[in-house]
Image (cartoon, rainbow, N blue to C red):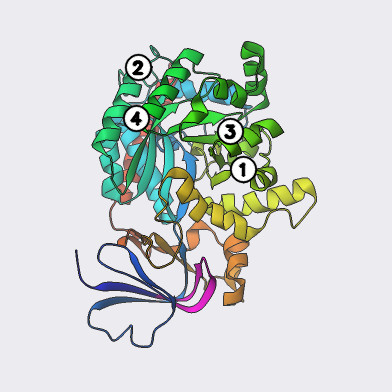
């Protein structure tokens, strides 16, 4: 561990205590924040400090993507104007042609996009193994990775891996033991959804999750059609059905939750279940608007997610921050019902807590230094006043404004240059993989 401090000095900084003008953030060689406040006069001259003078920039915590499927970057733009079930069928048909190399480059492309738009941690559900997890660790990001599964004998991604649901469950436990205590990676079970997973399979995963202390990442009540299907099959709403199977006795991260009833919201609040709000994906697929104000009132643990680019089509969380604020204002005809400051908190501190990285998510002494710097010299930021930083970040900023990204104190992105990923090579490989997938789909 190095004994020097890294110091970032910027025009303003977003901290739990409020906005700091003429700001300074310092972290030590372990990547832990040692100072967050007004610029210290002697910081630039100390010999044991490396100082980054970021004039015309502001600092905020790294963003946390509460739900995505990173490898699906290769499916960007597939079935753009279809309803949810036809879209899902088109995507799943294309997924049958994926190879392990495709999943790897799709993951890397997602990390390129996430890092350059300010995301430092993400929760993901797809095929995962140690080789893919090491790509995350090399890139420097943090991730909660869930191995997607559908049924004990169902092979989810036949061109990628022969693993069926039973295999994925066992591999989850092997990987959880392998990465126990890792600062960058957490492992989760990934039963896809109550409409794709049989009850006995879900009950078994719930028992295992409790016994091993491994979280579960799943989809719940994403569409009205799903809710109707579950009610017809099992005589209960999706969350009630999962509760009867014991799922919420474990730690759960539930994506979407668009169509929860009042009783289901109370259930998830009571069980400490975390939810992921994915406003852009939900709107694009015509699935509706999740009741974020009711979630907040009930005290739910909330994160903000993009879902995959197949249903979004970007991983830019700044789009979700703005949409997640103004969407509910328009739907409820109440401009005070959701505040930008609340959604920014959901996209950072609360999101980090929801996916299991509670030492990150805020710029204050003692936390890990997951921090991003955004340019404020562009037209959309002018005139800029430090007191209006929350307004700027909530309504004006975009991922394209990101200039620097540090994760655990590690500099991974600097002025448009990726320091841990070969972005140009990844983009080229991804384009080639998509061309092959499209050609294969045309022969089906």
Q: Position of residue 56 (x, y in %)?
A: 47, 76
In front here: 208 or 308?
208
The structure residue drawn at horizontal position 56% and vertical position 45%, both measured from the top left corner, is 302
Front label number (2 vs 3): 2
Q: What is the C-alpha distance between the residues marked 3 and 1?
A: 16 Å
Q: Which label number is shown at residue 279? A: 1
Q: Write the start and end of the magenta stretch as one range.
A: 9-23
> Cβ–Cβ below 8 Å for labels 4 and 3?
no
Q: Position of residue 290 (x, y in %)?
A: 66, 39
In front here: 234 or 387?
234
Q: Which label number is shown at residue 166? A: 2
Can residue 374 be spotted in the picture? yes
Q: Which label number is shown at residue 80? A: 3
Magenta residue check for 347? no
Left or right of residue 418: residue 218 = right
Q: Residue under circle 4?
A: 212
Tell me the SS state at disc 1.
helix
Q: Position of residue 189 (x, y in %)?
A: 40, 29
């Amino acid at each position: 561990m190095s004994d020097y401090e890294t110091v970032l000095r910027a025009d303003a900084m977003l901290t739990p205590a409020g906005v700091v003008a003429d700001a300074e953030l310092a972290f030590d060689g372990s990547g832990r924040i040692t100072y967050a406040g007004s610029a210290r006069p002697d910081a630039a001259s100390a010999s044991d400090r490396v100082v980054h003078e970021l004039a015309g920039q502001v600092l905020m915590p790294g963003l946390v993507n509460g739900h995505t499927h990173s490898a699906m970057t290769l499916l960007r733009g597939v079935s753009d104007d279809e309803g949810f079930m036809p879209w899902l069928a088109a995507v799943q048909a294309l997924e049958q042609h994926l190879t392990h190399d495709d999943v790897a480059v799709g993951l890397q492309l997602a990390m390129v996009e996430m890092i350059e738009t300010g995301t430092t941690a993400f929760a993901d559900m797809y095929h995962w193994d140690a080789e893919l997890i090491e790509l995350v660790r090399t890139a420097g990001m943090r991730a909660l990775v869930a191995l997607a599964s559908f049924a004990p004998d169902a092979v989810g991604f036949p061109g990628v891996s022969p693993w069926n649901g039973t295999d994925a469950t066992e591999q989850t436990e092997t990987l959880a033991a392998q990465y126990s205590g890792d600062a960058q990676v957490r492992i989760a079970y990934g039963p896809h959804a109550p409409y794709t997973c049989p009850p006995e399979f879900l009950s078994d995963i719930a028992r295992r999750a409790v016994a091993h202390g491994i979280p579960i990442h799943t989809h719940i009540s994403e569409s009205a059609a799903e809710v109707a299907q579950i009610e017809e099959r099992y005589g209960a709403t999706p969350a009630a059905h999962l509760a009867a199977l014991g799922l919420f006795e474990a730690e759960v991260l539930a994506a979407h939750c668009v169509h929860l009833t009042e009783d289901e919201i109370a259930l998830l609040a009571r069980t400490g279940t975390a939810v992921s709000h994915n406003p852009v994906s939900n709107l694009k697929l015509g699935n509706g608007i999740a009741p974020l104000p009711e979630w907040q009132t009930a005290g739910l643990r909330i994160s903000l997610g993009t879902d995959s680019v197949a249903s979004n089509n970007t991983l830019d969380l700044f789009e979700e921050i703005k949409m997640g604020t103004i969407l509910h204002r328009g739907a409820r005809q109440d401009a005070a019902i959701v505040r930008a400051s609340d959604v920014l908190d959901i996209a950072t501190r609360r999101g980090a807590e929801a996916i299991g990285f509670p030492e990150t998510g805020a710029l204050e002494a003692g936390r890990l230094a997951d921090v991003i710097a955004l340019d404020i010299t562009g037209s959309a930021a002018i005139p800029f006043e430090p007191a209006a930083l929350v307004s700027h970040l909530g309504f004006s900023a975009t991922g394209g404004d990101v200039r620097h990204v540090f994760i655990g104190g590690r500099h991974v992105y600097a002025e448009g240059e990726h320091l841990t990923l070969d972005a140009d090579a990844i983009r080229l490989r991804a384009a080639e993989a998509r061309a092959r997938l499209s050609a294969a789909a045309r022969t089906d």
